[in-house]
Image (spheres, rainbow, N blue to C red):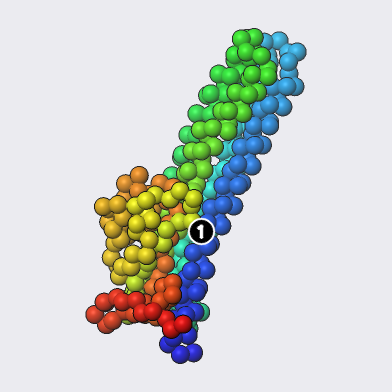
Amino acid sequence: MDAEEKARRFAAEAKARAADLPRIQKDTLAEIVRQLQLAQQAVIDALSATPSEAGQRRLRNLQQELERTLEDFRQATITTSTQGADQGWQAGIRSITAPFDVAGVSIAGARIDAAALMATRQLMTDRITDISLRALNRLNGALIQNVIGAVPLSDTITQVQKILGGVPRSRAMTVAYTEIGRVHSISQDAALQNAGHIVPNLHKRWLKSGKLHPRASHVAAHNQIRRYDEAYLVDGEHLRFPRDPNGSAGNTINCGCHSIPVVDGSSFGASTIRIGNDGGIRKVKLPT
């Protein structure tokens, strides 16, 4: 395999691996939505099943059922989110090692510290627990209004749907989407730093997300190329990678951008990237 073929395979695999993170995030968010729908239906079923019970007894039974339901949701969502984070972590490492593997270059051997993954798992657990407790308090308020006769059952069911379909859903999805993406970027960067000590002139390239309405500043950062150990400049901030924990919330939360490794000969649209021994970068138009 000649150098041009190695570069071609490397670039193709780097771009292919960029699709792993959105898939992991999509699957995780779909499961969170499913768990919320299960919780919503369980609360509605409990409300509908006990209309003839005396007030205090009915309230007590409903509150117990509500606590069980929200605890089931909390545990299931934590499991789903942390599994997504684990998958994102491994996918971040593969996004660097896989392109080199297909190009026949070994960069194996260095161990990546998983402390950031453990910290993220704990953060997600704490935030989802907080989301569940807040939802429980709001749902309890709705139940009390129904039991005392202040609000009819139909209106209470509507409230339940709004409560579980509103803030808890959006916050849980934001936490999972952002933090899974963050650990992916952190492990990717660690693998990239390891590779940079082995591969000469290794660089990286910022790619905008495929979202319908991406941040204008992230679109402006699209195709920035930096040395593997240098930061990108995004909206006036120096970010080592998308969702850099040192970046501002406005520049990192819900960011769907990617960073991919770049070597001499990597494709760049209809051009090829050439990296000189001095680190200089130029784009050479491919023959048609």
In the depicted structure, whether residue 106 falls above or below residue 254: below
Point out residue 231 in the picture as x, y percentages from the top left corner: 29, 62
In the depicted structure, whether residue 284 falls above or below residue 186: below
Q: Secondary structure at mark 1?
A: helix
Name the residue at 27% across, 53% down: 237
Residue type indicated by callout 1: Leu
Taking depth in this image into account, of 108 and 260 the one nearest to the observer is 260
Taking depth in this image into account, of 223 and 162 the one nearest to the observer is 223
Point out residue 183 in the picture as x, y percentages from the top left corner: 44, 56
Q: Residue furthest bottom?
A: 2
Counting labels gives 1
Quick check: 284 left or right of 212?
Answer: left
Q: Can residue 115 be seen in this snapshot?
A: no
Pointer 1: what residue?
A: 21
Quick check: 189 left or right of 280?
Answer: right
Tell me the crowding category of disc 1: few under 14, some 14 to 19, or many 20 or more residues within 10 angstroms, Cα based: many
Q: Residue furthest front?
A: 288
Name the residue at 64% across, 9% down: 149
Quick check: 46 left or right of 106?
Answer: right
Taking depth in this image into account, of 237 and 247 the one nearest to the observer is 237
Q: Can residue 212 be seen in this snapshot?
A: yes
In the depicted structure, whether residue 228 falls above or below residue 286: above
Name the residue at 69% across, 22% down: 47
In the depicted structure, whether residue 93 falls above or below residue 55: below
Point out residue 223 in the picture as x, y percentages from the top left corner: 37, 65
Name the residue at 46% across, 39% down: 127
